[in-house]
Amino acid sequence: MVKAIFVNVAVKNLDASIAFFKSLGFTFNAQFTDETASCMVMSDTIYAMLLTEAKFKEFTPRNICDTSKDAEVLIALSLESREAVDDLVRKAVASGGKTYGAPKDYGFMYQHAFHDLDGHAWEIFHMDPSFVQPT
């Protein structure tokens, strides 16, 4: 089984991206941070590697997506409440991010989203735990 996830995203300005995500309350692991990359800690097992475009290109033969025109991925983060969803999106917008639509209420799930400084899509949601059936 998978023990952890590291989502890798290309960024144009590493320092600006670090400052943006710090303003949202995320911390960074200094052990995996240098002038080309920084490890953002989202939980005990979930991390985002913010990589300069040059560093990102070391890991893939493909072109880096132009996020102003195309979606490369939707990064979905589950939070503990609807208020936490709204709060994180509010912080993202105040720090230079942009929303791309109104919040959505599906009854069992509440969702809102933002693009970060590099145009990566972050879907923030809260799901009613009673809706999820045991497997």
Image: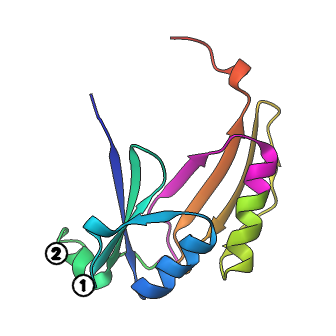
Q: In terms of secondary structure, where does tag 2 sit?
A: loop
Disc 1 secondary structure class: helix
Residue highlighted by disc 2: 58
Q: Is residue 46 magenta?
A: no
What's the residue type where badge 2 is placed? Answer: Glu
Q: Nearer the viewer, residue 131 or 4?
A: 4
Instruction: Quote the CA–CA distance across marks 1 and 2.
Output: 7 Å
Label 2 near label 1: C-beta < 8 Å? yes
Judged left or right of residue 85, residue 2 is left
Q: Quadrant of the N terminus?
A: top left
Give the side of residue 126 with respect to residue 62, left or right. right
- For residue 82, what is the image quadrant? top right
Q: Which residue is depicted at the point 29% across and 34% down?
A: 2
Q: Is residue 80 magenta?
A: yes
Q: Please indicate whether residue 48 sits to the left or right of residue 16 in the image.
A: left
Seen at 50% across and 66% down, the residue is 71
Residue closer to the observer: 106 or 23: 23
The type of colouring in the image is rainbow
**Is residue 63 among what the camera can see?**
no
Q: Is residue 70 left or right of residue 33?
A: right
Residue 86 pos. (x, y %):
79, 57
Say which of 104 and 131 sits in front.
Answer: 131
| Residue 104 visible, this angle | yes
Q: Position of residue 97 (x, y in %)?
A: 65, 77
Chain part drawn in magenta: 67-86
Q: Please name the residue that numbered disc 1 is placed on.
A: 54
